[in-house]
Amino acid sequence: MCGIAGVVYKDKKLHNVGDDMTKMLNALQHRGPDSAGFSIYGGLGLEDNEYLLNIEVKEKPGLLDTVKDTVNLTTPIKTDEIIPSVENFVIYRCKISLDNFSQLKPLIMDVDKLENVMVLNGSHSFEMIKDVGSVLEIADRYDTRSKMGTHAIGHTRFSTESIVDRYHAHPFQTYIIPDITVVHNGQITNYWKIRDPLERKGHIFETNNDTECIVHYVADKLSSGYSLEEALEQSVIDMDGPFSYVVGTPNGVGIAKDQLGLRPGVMAENDDVFAIASEEVSLREVMDTSNVEQISPGEVRVYEI
């Protein structure tokens, strides 16, 4: 079933988007109890060529030191912290500096080769937070309510076709271009037809989750010169199955809905905020909902700042 949400503040200023997205996702908690996640844009304040890594590390003697040594082979770690999680894992978060974005994926692949270690994400202009558990449990674990930003997307997951763990929690990211993330409700039934040509072009998939396929598809279109709206419009033509998905970029958010309208999606807008979600109850957490619009079958909406 799953719940998806997105919110944009039109003035481009920093707002308490972490708190708003926590409320929006908690209102959708009934749609997915397995895991939850956030992409919060605009609040990291990193310098050019600085990146934030979130790495899942099993609590084993010496393993965290091995992770640090592996990262340091590519670039010195500038700052770091350890965030307790569950199931005998911690999240190791570190800030690094690279000469260019193309170095990020090889570094991540080197770290992922370590046993009992998985890089959850690497980013420059957004902070990704995702884990197993309820929305409020994760909010407390990562202090999401204090996170500032200009816009965000989020997800609460009911797993139907892949395992429940941190990596399979949404949002999903690709490293084809910087800082594109996707949250998704539904199923892409022609998954392999979409994935195969992307792999032939050199895209590397880490899972068989269809949401990862969506984010690769969108990133590929954007890297080929499509606007976000054009990429989403083409996805509605190319993808089969029941789906609604939300894309986050450094410039805004967009939503796409399958041509039969088999998955829900609503939108509301005022002078200050643009918001989208699976259900109206989520929108009520951030704005007046007297003018809610249903996202029509096959429709695409984009709001960029």
Image (tube, rainbow, N blue to C red):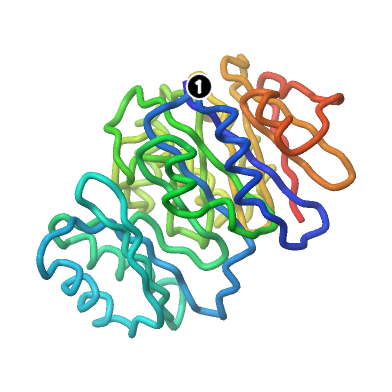
Residue 280: x, y in percent? Answer: 70, 24
**Residue 136 left/right relative to 292:** left
**Residue flagged by tag 1: what amino acid is it?**
His
The residue furthest right is 271
What residue is drawn where x is 50% and y is 50%?
A: 220
Residue linked to disc 1: 30
Q: Is residue 33 above or below residue 95?
A: above
Q: Is residue 149 above or below residue 133?
A: below
Residue 105: x, y in percent? Answer: 35, 65
Front residue of this view, candidates 166 and 103: 166
**Residue 277 left/right relative to 11:** left
**Residue 193 left/right relative to 38:** left
Image quadrant assignment for residue 300: top right
Image quadrant assignment for residue 109: bottom left
What residue is drawn where x is 35% and y is 31%?
A: 192
Residue 132: x, y in percent? Answer: 35, 39
Residue 210: x, y in percent? Answer: 39, 33
Q: Is residue 51 above or below residue 171?
A: below
